Amino acid sequence: MSKSASNHGVPGPRTLTVTARADGQRLDNFLLRELKGVPRGLLYRLVRQGAIRIDGRRCKVHQRLQAGSEVRVPDLDRPRESRPEVPPKVLDRLRRAIVYEDDQYLVLDKPSGLAVHGGSGLAFGIIEAMRQLRPDDELELGHRLDRETSGCLLLAKRRDALQAFHEALREGRVEKRYLALLVGRFASPEAVHCDQPVAAGRDAGGRKRMSAGAAEGREAHSVFRPLEPYGAFQLVEVSIGTGRTHQIRVHGQAIGHPVGGDHDYGLPDANRSLRRHGLERLFLHAQALRFEDANGEEHVFSAPLPESLNAVLASLAEPSAPGGRE
């Protein structure tokens, strides 16, 4: 529901009223649905500038809305609404990637190389493609994975299901486990904990980069449990209690063991070595996702390590392989 202010026929700011359907939704997701066709980057910039306000107050893109609140937005020139062209092979790939579905949730074994949403030069992402596959469902991302990360990605099919999952996230009732191949062997079989805060910044080229240890960073906690060494590399299981952008990759760098195949936070020499063993992507896979809903029911989802990553491990396991098993 919305109403517009005008002055002698000249379009003015609009006020969008938050309905019960959008109660608890993030501001950015609400705006993207209400203002279809407006670029995500523009909406984020308007929020940062204070041009978009909730009940007259400045806000943040990740702020959760409450039913009855009023979101004031400036008049925007919006292109004619059009759905992105999602290639049939991508739709088929995602259809085959569904590992679980009920009336509340849909879980994908997310392929590496597909972003979770469009924007920043991408015409579409997984959420846009899945909405095309399931037009009758109110699909929303429960959480996010990096573009190059594969594995368990949860989508909610109803608003109440999304709220239940986000409540579980806030209360620490969600456990995410990843498999990663790190550069350098661990000195002992003990788990390594990293609780350095993670902060956003920009590199010399202006691209967004995260860093660990900054006082202004957001709280983050990762646990790296060594599984098996592969020569100069270490296969680990990683569990995270928070979900910061690039958290595992940044924390791996912080403990001196960056993720193999990481071109932003990794080591070029190690990445070149892994390419000789067939690694063509980031070696990071969301293996399992577990959460307990408000009724105490436990939900557990898992996705096996992709064959392409298993092949890398097999190559590294060859006794005579450079950089592989000793």
Image: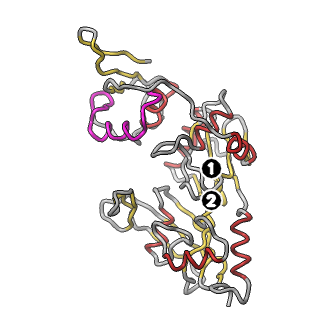
Pointers 1 and 2 in contact (C-beta within 8 Å):
yes
Whether residue 252 sits left or right of residue 72 in the image: it is right
Region in magenta: 35-57
Side of 211 where 238 appears, left or right: right
Quadrant holding the C terminus: bottom right
Question: Does dot 1 land on a helix, a strand or a loop?
Answer: strand
Cα distance between the residues tagged 1 and 2: 8 Å
Q: Nearer the viewer, residue 73 or 239?
A: 73
Q: Is residue 126 above or below residue 15?
A: below
**Quadrant in the picture for the N terminus:** top left
> Mark 2 falls on what kind of element?
strand
Mark 1 crowd level (few <14, some 14–19, many ≥20, 10 Å Cα): many
Residue at image coords 67%, 79%: 228
Which one is nearer the viewer's eye here, 201 or 24? 201
Q: Position of residue 275 (x, y in %)?
A: 61, 74
Q: Position of residue 245 (x, y in %)?
A: 46, 56
Which sits in the foreground, 272 or 186?
Answer: 272
Residue 175 magenta-drawn? no
Q: Quadrant of residue 48?
A: top left
Of the numbered discs in the image, which one, if any, rests on residue 240?
Answer: none
Q: Residue type at mark 2?
A: Ala
Above or below for 5 versus 122: above
Instruction: Choose the circle earlier in sequence order: 1 or 2.
Output: 1
Residue in view at x 59 percent, y 57 percent:
175
Residue under pointer 1: 153
For the residue marked with disc 1, what is the amino acid?
Answer: Leu
Note whether 27 is above or below 272 in the view shown. above
Residue drawn at x 57%, y 80% as measured from the top left:
190
Residue occupied by mark 2: 286
Left/right placement of residue 297 relative to residue 40 reads right
Report x, y in % for residue 118.
Answer: 52, 42
